[in-house]
Image (cartoon, helix red, strand yellow):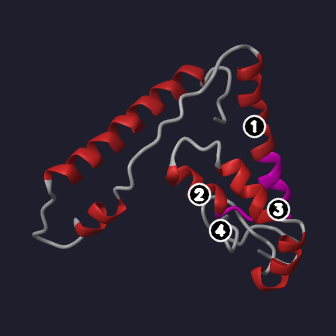
Amino acid sequence: MTAEGQPADDGVPEGFATGTPSSLALSGSDEALETIEFAAVLDGVAGYAAGPLGAERLRGRRPTAALEWIESELARVGEVAALFRNGDALLAESVPDARPALARLRVQGSVLEGAELLQIGRVLGAGRAVHADLSRVAPHAPRA
């Protein structure tokens, strides 16, 4: 991020981790975040996640001052909230953590056990189901 809180030249804000840019220096803001019990709030929100991986991602969120990013995210939330107000919903699937199996596949000649193949199959199935649901609501919530 530049000093004005703008994304870097490549369009990706510095400190971008788990999907949320952070324009705050972590060492300088840790005490402030602790004072406002930010971690406890994230834990509370993470309790509503579809699964442990979603909860992990939520717990990694950090505040930002990137106005364009904030406006974009609020527009997305507004669209999804309108779906819920109209009695619609979005599919959220819990998926197993297949990261270790996928990491092992980077090694040439490695093979997966049957249980690992099932994990990856569940991840792919969940991805297809969520994609289908997002495609269904795209006319009403294109940002979702």
Would residue 63 be seen by someone viewing this image from the given angle?
no
Q: Secondary structure at mark 4?
A: loop
- Indicate which label's residue lies in the foreground, 1 or 2: 2
Q: Which residue is tagged 3? A: 66
Query: Pointer 3: residues within 10 angstroms few (<14), some, or many (20+)?
Result: some
Specify the amino acid type for callout 3.
Answer: Ala
- Counting residues from the start of the chain, the first of labels 4 and 3 encountered is 4
How far apart marks 2 and 3 lie (CA) works out to 19 Å
Q: Which residue is tagged 1? A: 77
Q: State yes or no: discs 4 and 3 in contact (Cβ < 8 Å).
A: no
Would residue 100 be seen by someone viewing this image from the given angle?
yes
State yes or no: residue 66 in magenta.
yes
User: Is 78 drawn above or below residue 63 in the view shown?
Assistant: above
Specify the amino acid type for callout 4.
Answer: Phe
- Counting residues from the start of the chain, the first of labels 1 and 4 encountered is 4
User: Is 27 drawn above or below residue 60 in the view shown?
Assistant: below
